[in-house]
Every structure is written in C-alpha cells, then in structure tokens.
Amino acid sequence: MTKNDQLDFMNELTDNVIEKIFNKIIDNKIPESWEGIELRWYLADKFQDCVFGEYTKMSKRKQEYKNTVLVENL
C-alpha cells in the first residue's frame, strides 16, 4: 500500500466512524450524562468494531503488528 493509499484508507475509516458517532449524538442516542471518559470508551469501542473476523485473532500478523507498534514507539 502506498503512503497515499494508507492516508486515503485512514481518512475514509476515521471519517466513517466519526460520522456514525456524530449521528448517534445528533439523534440523542448518546446519554447527555456521558462526559469525556465515556465518550473516549465509546470511541475506542467503535474503532474496535472496525476490526473483525480473522483480524481479531492473535495471529502471527497481529503479533508482528504489536511488536512494530512497541519497537517504533507508535
């Protein structure tokens, strides 16, 4: 994947997640009592929902990913 492909993918992914969350807030689906911590948990959950199927298993590919994140301080 080229750098531009990566940027396009990340923009599309994050835009979609944020749009869904904004729509939940606009439609009064998110409790008004939720503050920063609940909204952070919700945001993390919604991004976690983007990971599915074989990608949720601790495969060799995921282990390599976790190692890269750790080593590169990402």
Image (cartoon, helix red, strand yellow):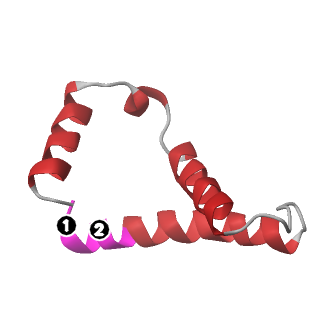
Circle 2 sits on which residue?
5
Is 2 colored magenta in this rendering? yes
Q: Pointer 1 and pointer 2: residues touching (CB < 8 Å)?
A: yes
Q: Circle 2 sits in a helix, a strand or a loop, which is it?
A: helix
Measuring 89% from the left and 69% from the top, which residue is drawn there?
A: 27
| Residue drawn 42% across the image and 31% down it | 56
Which image quarter is the N terminus in?
Answer: bottom left
Taking the spot 67% from the left edge, 58% from the top edge, the residue there is 38
Where are the magenta residues, as a range? 1-8
**Quarter of the view holding residue 40:** bottom right
Percent across and percent down for residue 48 are 52, 46
- The overriding secondary structure of the stretch rendered in magenta is helix
Rendered location of residue 19, percent (x, y): 67, 70
Most foreground residue, 32 or 68: 32
Kind of residue at disc 1: Thr
Identify the image quadrant of residue 4.
Answer: bottom left
Pick the front one: 19 or 73: 73
> Which element carries disc 1, helix, strand or loop?
loop
For disc 1, the marked residue is 2
Q: How many marks?
A: 2
Separation of marks 1 and 2 at Cα, in angstroms: 5 Å
Report the residue that reaches farthest toward the right: 28
